[in-house]
Image (cartoon, helix red, strand yellow):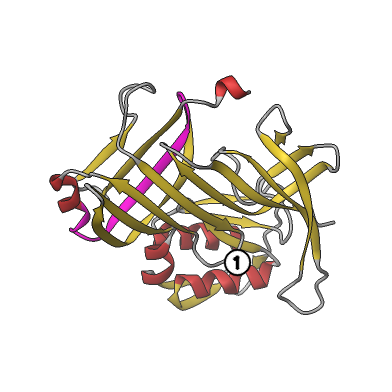
């Protein structure tokens, strides 16, 4: 495993959707020397949007000009060699450039799904019988994002139709409460699941051979809702793997813990020149 994870590579795309943009990083070869970059990404299964901070050294004047146009989207992929995975895609909400000794460093703040959750107002009117899945799909379309539904979800049929005028976020909350579902935005994709359950039964094996670092730590997370039990699981560190996302299933194999768990939260930290290049995740027991 160590030999497969020594060549850190990345690509970063920034620009206005359907307009002018730029791409930097290992765009031609894993062995080329790209601009210095560091990033810190925080993702969770909450309804609030995921966030990230990205620092890039010595961007060209042209690329800085593109960032100044506003309404930019950033897409970051990172990994080892040719094995890059999507780390985050979202709206750039803040750009600041300053001097770092003789170099120029630009810091980007990125929010996943910010525009969709904040700006989308919907007027929904389904007459007659309608499946809740159709309503979810309509709301996702209005927000301009794709929808991903967990395996085995049940979708009530509303005999009197569905009507709503307001923010798409509030409509999603109303639908989830009606159906007993949970929702979150991950990499600009609306994800609908059962509370406490993964989005798919297929999982990633996580052990010392696939990147697990050190010993898992036992965790207990208190519930934010009444009549819900505290959730238990493990906090783990592993070599950067953007393919493991929130609500994915992980098969953990270690001396102190083993079994199948759901990813509740994950942070991804990387620097292609120095420091850490790791993920820290909270894995919770899958709800009964």
The answer to whether residue 176 is visible is yes
Q: Which residue is mark 1?
A: 129
Residue closest to the eye, 238 or 137: 238
**Residue at 82% over, 77% down:** 227
- From this view, report whether residue 97 is shown above or below residue 22: below
SS at circle 1: loop
Residue reaching furthest to the front: 101
Looking at the rendering, the stretch of residues picked out in magenta corresponds to 67-83
Residue closest to the eye, 102 or 87: 102
Which image quadrant for residue 161?
Answer: bottom right
Which image quadrant for residue 24?
Answer: top left
Image location of residue 189, percent across then percent down: 49, 52
**Residue at 67% over, 29% down:** 210
**Residue at 45% over, 39% down:** 274
The answer to whether residue 134 is visible is no
Q: Is residue 278 left or right of residue 286?
A: left
Quadrant containing the N terminus is top right
Image location of residue 251, percent across then percent down: 76, 38
**Residue at 75% over, 72% down:** 223
């Amino acid at each position: 495993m160590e030999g497969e994870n020594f060549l850190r590579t990345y690509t970063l795309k920034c620009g206005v959707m359907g307009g002018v943009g730029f791409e930097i990083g290992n765009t031609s070869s894993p062995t080329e020397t790209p601009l210095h970059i560091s990033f810190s990404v925080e993702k969770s299964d909450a309804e609030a949007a995921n966030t990230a901070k990205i620092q890039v050294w010595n961007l060209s004047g042209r690329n800085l000009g593109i960032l100044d146009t506003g309404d930019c989207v950033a897409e970051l992929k990172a990994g080892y060699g040719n094995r890059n995975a999507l780390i985050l895609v979202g709206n750039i909400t803040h750009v600041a450039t300053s001097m770092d000794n003789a170099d120029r460093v630009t810091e980007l703040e990125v929010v996943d799904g910010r525009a969709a959750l904040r700006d989308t107002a919907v007027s929904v009117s389904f007459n007659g019988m309608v499946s809740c899945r159709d309503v979810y799909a309509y709301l996702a379309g209005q927000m301009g994002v794709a929808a991903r539904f967990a395996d085995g979800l049940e979708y009530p049929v509303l005999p009197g139709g569905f009507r709503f005028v307001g923010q798409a976020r509030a409509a999603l909350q109303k639908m989830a409460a009606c159906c007993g579902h949970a929702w979150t935005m991950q990499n600009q994709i609306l994800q609908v699941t059962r509370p406490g359950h993964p989005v798919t039964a297929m999982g990633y094996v996580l052990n010392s051979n696939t990147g697990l670092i050190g010993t898992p730590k036992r965790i207990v997370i208190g519930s934010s809702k009444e009549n819900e039990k505290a959730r238990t699981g493990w906090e783990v560190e592993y070599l950067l793997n953007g393919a493991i996302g929130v609500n994915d299933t992980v098969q953990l194999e270690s001396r102190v813990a083993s079994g199948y768990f759901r990813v509740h939260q994950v942070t991804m930290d990387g620097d292609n020149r120095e420091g850490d290049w790791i993920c820290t995740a909270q894995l919770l027991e899958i709800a009964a």
